[in-house]
């Protein structure tokens, strides 16, 4: 772990804004994140924290009229993704970086058969592959995600949510990508199916040595799947560290503490859940200082005016005034 | 499904036409006829029977192709319509084909290049075209192309050339509405998650549009085109009058003017029925394109 | 989460303000609103601008004179002032257009609301009838009714109204259905709120947007259809001024007096255009999600 290596993906000072006629939304505000080869990094936070926007920025799939990357760089194996031409970017998508979207019900084309949709991925990135070989590979992929290959001629509406998500996984992994971004892959599924799909993803990722960014708001999923975790709030990463760092009982950002207190714990007999008071700030009108201060029980004067300095302890970093600063930079 | 719908349509049209005030026997014989003659004719033609009985008899005869005889010419209604029907169908089909060929591609272009010059010009022209009354456009077209420039004939349906102006006139509002609808459904479709999935696969923008978006976006357009055909059959009535084309449209107008009730009823039923049959084809076509509908049909059978 | 009604009074107010603000930004929609307001104003003050007499009487000495300072739009084959005729005709066209839509919405709305809200048998009976009537092309239905009732403004109006009902039943039913499916309606039902109250308080306000858009644009279409019936000689009868009837008269003088064809058509097109522009702008203001 201690041995330094070049990260597979390195996000530096990324800022993303959505500019509409109505308002400018500050969705992502200067985040840094590294993913090493073979690693799974959990990106955790409430709805609207900027997790999906970060993922779409990496894929360069932000809505092109409104979504703007205003600052920072995204290095994939040392090359800046943001400087690539559209053609080069297309080559990367699906082949080197893949993405699984949140809702399997809507992320498959209703008028194409499942087989065709998997085939398409293969055809885009394997121009010379023979039809017979492609067919065989489609069958192989279906078997891999646990769907009988004979069902490839069926349409999405003939499958259940869990099965659709398996197909989406098959599409994403068709070209054995180096990085898989999974945006809440199990949120739309039944609890029993969730575990199956997560297990499948874990298994496939291990066997292909694929790195993964797992976007979720489920801390249970984090503890099962992730090597590293970054907690996002209002477009910033407010705490980051190894999964153990985040899940242990050591010092934490008040927001992280709040997140943990919001989930019921079967082992501990607590009287009540203690949810975090208030709502996420409107990203079109963010508060000054620490973005969390309006909801924070420990907020002091400094929190209202100054951006919190990072508190660093090994790999574990917390952006909060409570712990003071150990060096000058940003997380 | 077809037969009860046909019966219902005949019921409605026949019902509306029987609302005509005044005594039909008097209408036929004129004001100077003797009361005895009128009463005699009324009995002979069955006007004294209750409405439901007359409707039943009408349907029974209609099933054998007998829609009665014209009060004015005495000729069988069916025969007159059959003679005129091909002209009207040719004209409407030409207009629909024209409208689809112009409206749909321009709508796709406007959506894919939203806010571009194509979008602005396309939607603006569509807006103007949707606001212009068809018969006025027809009159203006005659004024410029026939009377001023003497390029195209202004009336009749003798040659292909004769069809150009009326078909274009009929097609314009349909093309305008198809353009706008295609644009809207296309804009909605390219915001769908599965389009993002296709982009995430690394698919080129062209293929994203043609392989993924187009088919899904055109599904509602298919139904709309069918519905537009109904509007077109209505428009045919005015446009045939403008261009003096001897189709069913002009026939029904002449029949209304002369209070020739059997002829009006027959024409209305004919046009409504052909629209209904067309919608049935559209439904079948739709089921053929959309796997979801196809599946639900298969389940039903 | 947009539809949760935290505080319906303030929300509704701010929402209406928001829509108006977006609409004001849409220059084309404002042009439409301006043109239509101007047309409305001219229509209302028609008698002040030029007396009705001028629209229906003229001297044969003045027949078919091209536009001039004394007759802005020229005169027709009876020597009547075309400008005066167009101006006074607008009242009939607007009454027919707006009247048909208002009555169509009210009756169709009642049917559609019942069908959409109660569902089940009520829905299937109403929709079966509506689906049949809708199979008859609109213009054909109008003509059949006018043929039965005889020509004239009132009869055309009745024909247009009746023909409008099925369309609005469908529109309003589907609008209601999309709202009824929403969670907050379920929530209101589960709290024991009476049905009538739910329709009035929750369903209608939320379904009204698309209905207004549709209505605005349909007024334009109705004006065109009304003119069509008159053009065919089934609507308003001469010498009463009506745009469609004026066009019918102009047919025989197209070469000698092209202005007779142009101006009434411009009047119809401009009115319909202004309504379409307004409806379009309103739709964008109500539903801005396709803009990005």
Image: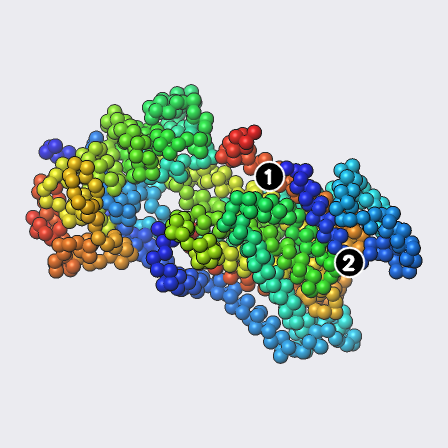
Q: Position of residue C92 (x, y in %)?
A: 65, 67
Instruction: Residue at 34%, 57% (x, y): give it.
Output: C6
Circle 2 sits on which residue?
A: B21
Q: Nearer the viewer, mark 2 or mark 1?
A: 2
Secondary structure of the residue carrying tag 2 is: loop
Disc 2 chain ID: B
Relative to the observer, which residue lies in front, A199 or B214?
A199
Instruction: Residue at 72%, 57% (x, y): give it.
Output: C146
Quadrant of the rendered image containing residue C70: bottom right
Judge from the rendering whether residue C180 lies leftward or rightward of residue A232; answer left or right: right
- Marks 2 and 1 on same chain: yes
Residue A121 visible: no
Judge from the rendering whether residue B233 lies leftward or rightward of residue C125; answer left or right: right
Assign the C terminus of chain B to one quadrant of the image.
Answer: top right
Find out whether the residues at labels 2 and 1 contact each other: C-beta distance under 8 Å: no
Which label sits on residue B282?
1
Q: How is the model colour-coded?
A: rainbow
Of the numbered discs 2 and 1, the one sitting upstream in the chain is 2
Judge from the rendering whether residue B258 lies leftward or rightward of residue C219; answer left or right: right
């Amino acid at each position: 772990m201690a041995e330094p290596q070049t990260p597979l993906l390195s996000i530096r000072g990324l800022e993303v804004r959505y500019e509409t006629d109505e308002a400018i939304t500050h969705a992502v505000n200067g985040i840094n994140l590294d993913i090493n080869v073979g690693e799974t990094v959990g990106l955790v936070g409430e709805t609207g924290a900027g997790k999906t926007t970060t993922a779409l920025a990496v894929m360069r799939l932000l809505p092109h009229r409104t979504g703007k990357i205003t600052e920072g760089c995204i290095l994939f194996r040392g090359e800046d993704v943001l400087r690539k031409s559209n053609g080069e970017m297309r080559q990367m998508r699906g082949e080197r970086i893949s993405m699984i979207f949140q809702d399997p019900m809507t992320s498959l084309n209703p008028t194409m058969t499942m087989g065709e949709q998997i085939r398409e991925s293969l055809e885009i990135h394997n121009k010379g592959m023979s039809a017979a070989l492609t067919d065989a590979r489609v069958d192989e992929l279906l078997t891999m995600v646990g769907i009988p290959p004979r069902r490839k001629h069926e349409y999405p509406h003939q499958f259940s949510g869990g099965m659709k998500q398996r197909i989406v996984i098959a599409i994403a992994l068709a070209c054995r990508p180096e990085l898989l971004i999974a945006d809440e892959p199990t949120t739309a599924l039944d609890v029993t199916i969730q575990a199956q799909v997560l297990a499948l993803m874990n298994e496939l990722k291990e066997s292909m040595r694929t790195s993964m960014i797992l976007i979720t708001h489920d801390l249970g999923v984090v503890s099962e799947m992730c090597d590293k975790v970054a907690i996002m709030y209002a477009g910033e990463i407010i705490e980051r560290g190894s999964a153990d760092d985040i899940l242990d009982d050591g010092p934490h950002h008040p927001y992280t503490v709040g997140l943990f207190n919001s989930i019921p714990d079967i082992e501990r007999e607590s009287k009540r859940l203690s949810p975090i008071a208030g709502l996420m700030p409107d990203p079109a009108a963010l508060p000054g200082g620490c973005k969390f201060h309006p909801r924070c029980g420990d907020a002091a004067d400094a929190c209202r005016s100054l951006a919190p300095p990072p508190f660093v302890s090994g790999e574990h970093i917390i952006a909060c005034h409570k712990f003071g600063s150990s060096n000058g930079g940003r997380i | 499904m077809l037969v009860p719908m046909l019966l219902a349509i005949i019921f409605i049209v026949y019902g509306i036409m029987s609302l005509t005030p005044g005594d039909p026997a008097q209408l036929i014989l004129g004001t100077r006829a003797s009361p005895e003659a009128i009463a005699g004719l009324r009995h002979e033609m069955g006007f004294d029977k209750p409405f439901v009985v007359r409707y039943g008899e009408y349907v029974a005869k209609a099933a054998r192709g007998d829609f009665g005889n014209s009060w004015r010419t005495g000729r069988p209604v069916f025969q007159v319509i059959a003679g005129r029907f091909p002209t009207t169908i040719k004209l409407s089909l030409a207009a629909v084909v024209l409208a689809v060929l112009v409206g749909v591609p321009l709508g796709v272009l406007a959506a894919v290049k939203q806010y571009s010059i194509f979008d602005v010009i396309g939607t603006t022209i569509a807006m103007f075209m949707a606001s212009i009354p068809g018969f006025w456009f027809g009159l203006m077209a005659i004024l410029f192309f026939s009377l001023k420039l003497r390029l195209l004939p202004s009336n009749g349906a003798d040659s292909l050339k004769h069809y150009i102006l009326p078909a274009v006139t009929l097609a314009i509002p349909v093309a305008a509405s198809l353009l706008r609808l295609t644009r809207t459904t296309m804009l909605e479709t390219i915001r769908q998650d599965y389009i993002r999935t296709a982009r995430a696969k690394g698919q080129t923008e062209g293929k994203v549009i043609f392989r993924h978006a187009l088919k899904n976006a055109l599904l509602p357009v298919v139904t709309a085109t069918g519905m537009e055909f109904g509007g077109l059959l209505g428009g045919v009535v005015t446009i045939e009058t403008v261009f003096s084309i001897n189709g069913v449209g002009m026939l029904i107008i002449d029949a209304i003017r002369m209070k020739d009730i059997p002829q009006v009823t027959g024409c209305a039923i004919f046009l409504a029925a052909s629209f209904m049959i067309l919608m049935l084809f559209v439904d079948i076509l739709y089921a053929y394109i959309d796997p979801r509908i196809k599946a639900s049909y298969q389940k039903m059978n | 989460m947009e539809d949760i009604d935290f505080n319906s009074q303030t929300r509704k107010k701010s929402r209406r303000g928001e829509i108006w603000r977006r609409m004001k930004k849409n220059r084309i929609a404002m042009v439409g609103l301006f043109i239509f307001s101007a047309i409305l104003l001219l229509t209302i003050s028609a008698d002040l601008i030029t007396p009705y007499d001028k629209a229906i009487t003229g001297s044969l000495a003045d027949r078919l004179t091209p536009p001039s300072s004394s007759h802005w739009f020229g005169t027709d084959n009876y020597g009547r002032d075309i400008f005066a005729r167009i101006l006074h005709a607008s009242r009939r066209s607007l009454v027919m257009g707006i009247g048909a839509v208002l009555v169509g919405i009210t009756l169709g709305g009642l049917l559609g609301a019942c069908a959409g809200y109660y569902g089940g048998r009520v829905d299937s009976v109403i929709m079966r009838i509506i689906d049949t009537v809708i199979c008859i092309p609109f213009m054909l239905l109008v003509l059949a009714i006018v043929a039965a009732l005889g020509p004239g403004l009132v009869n055309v109006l009745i024909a247009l109204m009746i023909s409008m009902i099925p369309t609005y039943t469908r529109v309003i039913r589907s609008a209601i259905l999309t709202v009824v499916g929403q969670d907050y309606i379920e929530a209101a039902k589960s709290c024991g709120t009476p049905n009538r109250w739910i329709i009035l308080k929750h369903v209608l306000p939320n379904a009204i947007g698309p209905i207004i858009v549709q209505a605005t644009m349909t007024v334009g279409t109705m004006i065109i259809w009304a003119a069509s019936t008159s053009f065919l000689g089934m609507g308003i009868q001469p010498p009463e001024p009506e745009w469609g009837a004026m066009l019918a008269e102009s047919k025989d003088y197209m070469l000698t007096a092209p202005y007779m064809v142009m101006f009434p058509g411009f009047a119809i097109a401009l009115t319909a255009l202004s309504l379409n522009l307004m409806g379009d702008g309103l739709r964008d203001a109500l539903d801005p999600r396709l803009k990005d």
